[in-house]
Image: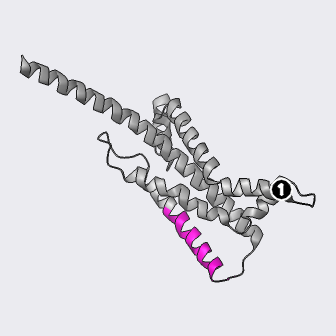
Amino acid sequence: MKILIIKMLEKLPIVGGLVNCCAADFTTAAKEVLSTLLIALSPIWLGTLFLFIRANEKRDYIDILIDSVRNGELMLYCTALLAPVFYITSSDKYSIGVFPNKLSSNITAIIILLITTAVYTMQRIGSSYNNNLMLKLSAILFFVSLIILFVNKVYNYSKLDTYMDISQQEEKNFSAQLNQRRQ
């Protein structure tokens, strides 16, 4: 029964391969994604902190933060978060099989990139839009991009572990064959 459930979960788009990853893969990916976010989003959270300290009116930090991203600024961060996904999924360094859920990750990333490009272009040409809708859309796309990046990082660490194990085994085999020829 457990094997059947795992086989069913493996078929889910984007997240299906996570059932074959270990806790260390999740932890390493989480550390990398969180540190990336902390540094990449520093203009937003640090700028908001400066505005909060400088503000004469009684506004809280969250209100200032929301105002900082109300015009869809998070959409630009979507592209930065998704760029590594294409590199990770297209890398052929794995001799152990195809990258899990490669197609669904890339298609979702392309759709998000097309939406963000269209919205950015509309803003640049001066089209009018609803700021609240823009905030919600950019937040949703940002979190979906973040999830896709995290999942692909987990897969990448999982595959790297397996790849390293295979490489080490190949190295041992090579050394053993070399020692046999010397004798």
Question: Main structural element of the magenta stretch: helix, strand or loop?
Answer: helix
Residue at left offset 87%, top offset 60%: 55
> Badge 1 is on which residue?
52
Residue 1 shows up from this direction: no
Q: Counting other residues with Cα less than 10 Å from the Cα at mark 1, is it few (<14), some (14-19), or many (20 or more)? A: some
Residue at left offset 74%, top offset 57%: 47
Asked if residue 139 lies left or right of residue 153, the reply is: right
Identify the image's colour scheme: rainbow, by chain, secondary structure or one colour.
one colour
Q: Position of residue 77 (x, y in %)?
A: 60, 60
The type of residue carrying mark 1 is Phe
Residue 179 shows up from this direction: yes
Q: Position of residue 33 (x, y in %)?
A: 57, 45
Note whether 163 is above or below 86 in the view shown.
above
- Image quadrant holding the C terminus, namely top left
Q: Position of residue 126 (x, y in %)?
A: 67, 83
Asked if residue 163 lies left or right of residue 16, the reply is: left
Looking at the picture, tell me which residue is in the foreground, 68 or 50.
50
Please, which residue is most extreme toward the top here? 183
Q: Is residue 124 magenta?
A: yes
Looking at the picture, tell me which residue is in the foreground, 75 or 58.
58
Q: For residue 69, what is the image quadrant?
A: bottom right
Q: Position of residue 15 (x, y in %)?
A: 52, 45
Asked if residue 156 lies left or right of residue 39, the reply is: left
Q: Which residues are magenta?
A: 110-127
Residue at left offset 46%, top offset 31%: 3
**Total labels drawn:** 1
Note whether 135 is above or below 23 in the view shown.
below
Q: Is residue 22 magenta?
A: no
Q: For residue 139, what is the image quadrant?
A: bottom right
